[in-house]
Every structure is written in structure tokens, then in C-alpha cells.
Image (tube, rainbow, N blue to C red):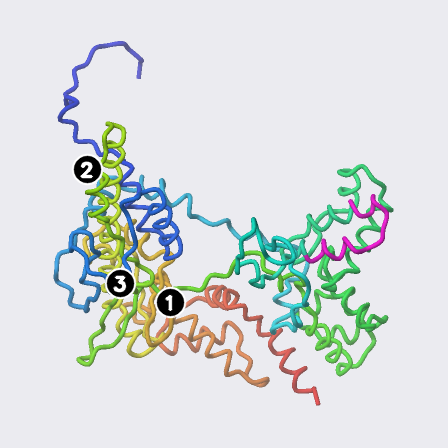
Amino acid sequence: MALTVKLQQRQGQIQGLNQGLTMTPQLVQSIKLLQMNSFELLEHIGQEIEKNPLLELAEPGDNYNRETEMSETETATLDVSSELDTSTAALEEKLGTSLENEFDSDRSGGEISSKSERPSTDDIFPFPMNTGAMPSGPNYSGMSGATGFQDGEYNIENFLATKPTLREHLGAQLAITRVEDVIRLIAADIIDSLDEDGYLRRDAEEVAQTLGVKISEVSAALALVQGMEPTGVGARNLAENIKLQLIEKNRFDPAMQCLIDNLELLAKRDFNGLAKLCNLGLDDIMDMVEEVRGLDPRPARRFDHFPIQEIIPDVFVRELPDGSFGIELNPDALPKVLINQTYQAIVTKSASSDKDKTFIAECLQNANWLTRSLEQRAQTILKVTAEIVRQQDGFFINGIRHLRPMSLKRIADEIKMHESTVSRVTSNKYLQSSRGMFELKFFFTAAISGVDGATEFSAESVRHEIRQLIDTETVETILSDDSIVGILQGKGIEIARRTVAKYREALHIPSSVQRRREKKANLKRP
């Protein structure tokens, strides 16, 4: 088709009648509030209260106007019939997937890196490790002087005990060690390079080239760090970590050396192969394996790297006397924000300059929008959760075997909302029921067809069936993946062998060969 230049007429809209949708800051805030979890919401509200003098948090028992109050209808049953405001969902419907791409990108976590060649510590240490007690020691941060006074004032927070970080703990040991200055500087750099498990993932040559020092000096500094507490810190791989801990226990002998040199067999639970390779009896191998399992594969994990946050449920689900289910928002996860109308009247009356009046007007507008957005968020969570419970009532009554396959689109269609809205509502939101606490995303699982072609089973319930079958195995009745397929098909579940293998690996269950080896080895134990 030839390119030509020509004039064409097109019908358009004048600017005043343009029907396009603009992403206003208020709409952005409303959507972001919807996808925040309880901790992020509390932090955001705190920031808004700091910069907006008209906002305040409601105290329990406060009486205030309904205009500034969160919705009093905080409990719903499964037959919710009242029409809720879904303006945000309607806007998202017009915007389509552009909102999905715009706001989900900043909340997406990094993907797990591919498996390295070294054996997985979860395979070698399938049971909880004995990490020992947290060593006591001085707190090197958070104190202002020995007496806890700062600027002449008494602050009780200075006396609160906090755990030192790994770097603070190792730095304190380095500070009292008599060593040459160059070795001390290299050791400090090595300490800063340790990962959250206490491993050094850098080569000695790289450290030497970066700091411009000799390889021998790096080796001396590394030996200094590896001699610190906790034992095993500074190791460059799992084998070296185990070796350091065994040396400290005076249990590193040629037999242990043979075991450590063949960790891949230990990861596969090939105890007979280890016994032949190390020229030892199976009982001796099992004794050594138990000793290795008692070591700590992550020597630095006893130190706090990030504050651990307790999960706060956003919604409570309880069974009512008539057999239906009630859904109630958790007030601790959804604080009530008020507009202090008394203070607003005072500052409005006392404002003299146009700048002050503009500032007060903006604060009032932002406060009104925030309170409405919070109420909209609460109603949307309530509506979505009510539909989830209605769809999954079998789970709440009879357990995980009755979990039904369900998609975001199915819920969105039922409650007349956009699918991206449901996705944001269910992300990082938790439901507390008599069966435990579950993330709302837990209830969305893929469908697995039944043998008859009409029945569908939830993928989560199928994984539960696989776990139950393997938990009841004996050494004579170890089930292969093909055997599990046959049993599931007998229960009406049409599933492929590769799917069973995928679910089994997701549950961190070893293969039938490895399970048989471990059970036989355990039977031979006295």
C-alpha cells in the first residue's frame, strides 16, 4: 500500500465536553488504600494525620458526628443485599488493565532465584535446627550515655532491651581483638559483606582486589571472622559452615570429612551410599547424620534483620446460630479517622491571609476524601469477603477437602466489580475463622477436572489429599507418583503424574525412592 499525503476530516469533542477519565491524586490514593494491608494502612494514616491538622484518630467510646464516622455497618451476613458504593470499581472498569499495570508494579516482590548447585539446606536439614540460646551481651545501639539520659532528660525507652544486629555483634568482638590494623579493616569489610544467613558470598581474590591487599591478609582476616561467635559465621558455603561447627565441637574427623564431602548424597537421603563410600556401618552413618542435623545451617538467623510483624486479621468470620456466617471487620485493622470540626472552625475564623485560607481548604478537602476512601475500602472488603465465604461455605463447615475451585473473575462477576479491584482487596488481607487464619488469596485455586468430566476439584484440596496419602505411608507401602495418580482417580480426580510430582515438590516432599531410604534407615535405628 503506497504512502500518500491527504486531508481527512474526523469528528472530535471539544475540550469542555471531553469524557476522558483523568487519574486524579484522590483516585490514586483511593486505589492505593484498597491494596494496603493493615500495617501499611496504619502507617499511611499516621503520615496523613501528621501533615493534616484537621485529622485525628477516634478513641474508643468517642461520640462524634456520623458525617466523619466510618460506616457503622461493619457486620454482614451472607445474604448482603444493600447496594454498596462501588464508584472506585466503576472507574477501574473504565480504565481497564491500565490501573493493574500502574499500581501493581510497586507491590510485586522479586522472584526466587534459581537453585544453586550446592545442596539445599532444607533437604539436608528437614527438621528444626537447635540454634541455641541467644548470647547475652551489651547493647551497642539505642543508649545515650551510661545512665540513659539525653539532653538532661530521662527517657525510659533508653533502657528497653533490644537485640544487636549481626554486624554489631561481630563488630563488638572485633573491637576487643588485638590484631594489626590492616587485618582489622579487612575483617570489618568481610563482616559488612555477610548475607542475612552469615555466609560470605565473595571470593578472597575479589576482596583482595577491591581493598588492594594481599591474599594472605584476606585469609588471615577471614580466619579471624570465622573464629567469632556464632560459630559458622563467615563460611563461604554450607560444607564449610558445618566443618567450622564440628571443629568447634572437636568432632571433625576423617569420617565426618567424608560425610561433608558428599553432602549431595545426604540431601538425597542415600544413607546406604554414604555408608559404602565412607566405609562405615549404617548405624555409624545415621549417628553422624543426626549430629549434623543438630547443627545450624544458618548461623546468623538468630539475629534480627527485619522487625517481625504479627499478622492482624482484617475480617472475622463466625458461624451464627441459624447456620449462616457473619462477617465482621476487625476494628484494630481499620481505625476510625475523624475530622476535628471544632478546630477547623477555629482556624478558619482566625485565618487572615489568602495563603492560610487556601491551606485550610486543602486540608479539609483531603480529610474528607481520606475518610470517604477509608469507608469505601471497608465496604469493599466486606462485600468481597462476604461473597468469598458464600462461595466457600463448604470449607468453613467441613474443612479443606470441600474447598471449591474459584477465580477472581468469578467473584468480580458476582458482586459487579472489576477483577483488578477484587485482586487488590484480597492481596495481603487475612481472614480469621474457627478453622484458623487464612489470606484471602488462599481461597482462589485452580480447578482440576473430575473423572466424569463434570465435577471440579480445588487444587488446594488435591494437594491436601496428596499430603494425607504420603503421611500414612509405611516402609512397605511407599507410594510412587503413579500410585498416587491411581488412588486419586479412584476418588474421582483426573490428574496427570507430572501434576502430582509438581504438587509433591511444592509441598517439599521427597521422591518415593528417598522416602523409602529414610524409612528403612529409621527402622534400622535401635
Residue 173 painted magenta: yes
Q: Are marks 2 and 1 in contact (CB under 8 Å)?
A: no
Crowding around mark 2 (Cα neighbors within 10 Å: few <14, some 14 to 19, many 20+) is few
Residue type at numbered disc 2:
Lys
Q: Which mark is residue 358?
A: none
Element type at mark 2? helix
Q: CA distance from mark 2 to mark 1?
A: 50 Å
Crowding around mark 1 (Cα neighbors within 10 Å: few <14, some 14 to 19, many 20+) is some
Question: What x and y, as percent, mark residue 174?
Answer: 77, 54
Element type at mark 1? strand
Residue with the mark numbered 3: 385
In magenta, the rendered stretch is: 169-185
Q: Are marks 3 and 2 in contact (CB under 8 Å)?
A: no
Crowding around mark 3 (Cα neighbors within 10 Å: few <14, some 14 to 19, many 20+) is many
Nearer mark to the viewer, of 3 and 2:
2
Question: What x and y, as percent, mark residue 409?
Answer: 27, 54
In what quadrant of the picture does the C terminus appear?
bottom right
Q: Which mark is residue 438?
A: 1
Q: Is residue 81 left or right of residue 411?
A: left
Residue with the mark numbered 2: 349
Residue type at numbered disc 3:
Thr
Element type at mark 3? helix
Total marks shown come to 3
Earlier along the polypeptide chain: callout 3 or callout 2?
2
Residue type at numbered disc 1:
Phe
Residue at 62%, 64% in the rendered image: 302
Residue at 67%, 61% in the rendered image: 138
- Residue 305 picture quarter: bottom right
Q: CA distance from mark 3 to mark 1?
A: 12 Å
